[in-house]
Image (tube, helix red, strand yellow):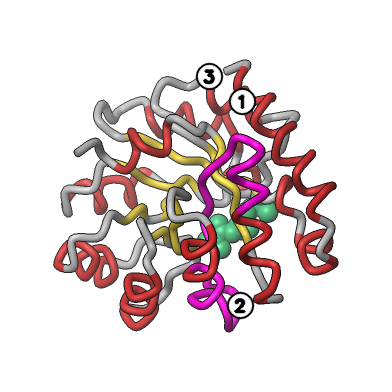
Amino acid sequence: MSSLADQLAQFKVIPVIEISVLSSAAPLADALMQNGLPVAEVTFRSDIAAEALAAMKAAQPELLVGAGTVLTTEQVDKAIAAGADFIVSPGFNPKIVQYCQQQSVAMIPGVNSPSQIEQVMELGVTAIKFFPAEATGGVKFLKAILAPYRNIRVMPTGGINAANILDYLALPAVFACGGSWMVDKKLLDAGDFDTLGKLIADARAVVEKA
Ligand SMILES: O=C(O)C(=O)C[C@H](O)[C@H](O)COP(=O)(O)O
């Protein structure tokens, strides 16, 4: 089976979603499928994240759905039970990385320094999230910290949008970027799936140029 990074690389942009209204989950899954971006990272920032993730999988079983903002092993259990295809964390918590390895679920920890990169490498991790990408120093900083490391693949997230995503995707180590601009929370909570559908299709069109 191909690695998680290889699977995510086909989409180039991963919608990072915060769902607060459970009834939005299924139509959002439909909008992602219908507009050419069949992938999602559902953040555990909301209380209903696990239910929303399960509802998205139930509506569109082909959708690749990860759990984001996973901060505890209990959340890993919840995400797996809900049908998560992968786990993402904003930071590097060795306990969570090792727990995911024991559970055989693919996991991408967040890092933003050379020391953290070396610590994740120690655990056999080869795909990392660079978070918060723009606030940490953007493409220039990422290029500089990656220079010494050969086998690391990166998913920058945080402050990425249609105007800067191609600069990140131009780096050979970057397999995809996380971004929330095409799954805007206000539109989601208001149930405006027409506008969301257009934003999703536009995001897909932008990364096609990479
Ligand atoms: O919670 C996490 O683990 C995240 O990665 C969430 C990020 O902060 C954003 O939701 C994505 O960043 P933006 O595209 O700037 O909105």
Query: Which residue is found at the position 58% from the left and 80% from the top?
Result: 48
Percent across and percent down for residue 81 are 34, 76
In the image: residue 28, left or right of residue 172? right
Residue type for callout 3: Ala
Closest to the observer, 169 or 6: 6
Q: Helix or strand or loop: what does disc 1 sit on?
A: helix
Query: Which residue is found at the position 63% from the left and 52% from the top?
Result: 30
Q: Quadrant of ligand 1?
A: bottom right
Q: In this picture, is 209 found above or below 91? A: above
Residue type for callout 1: Val
Q: Nearer the viewer, mark 1 or mark 3?
A: 1
Q: Quadrant of residue 49 in the image?
A: bottom right
What residue did someone put label 3 on? 170
Residue type for callout 2: Ser
State the extent of the magenta-drawn residues as a range: 30-53
Q: Which mark is residue 46?
A: 2
What residue did someone put label 1 on? 207
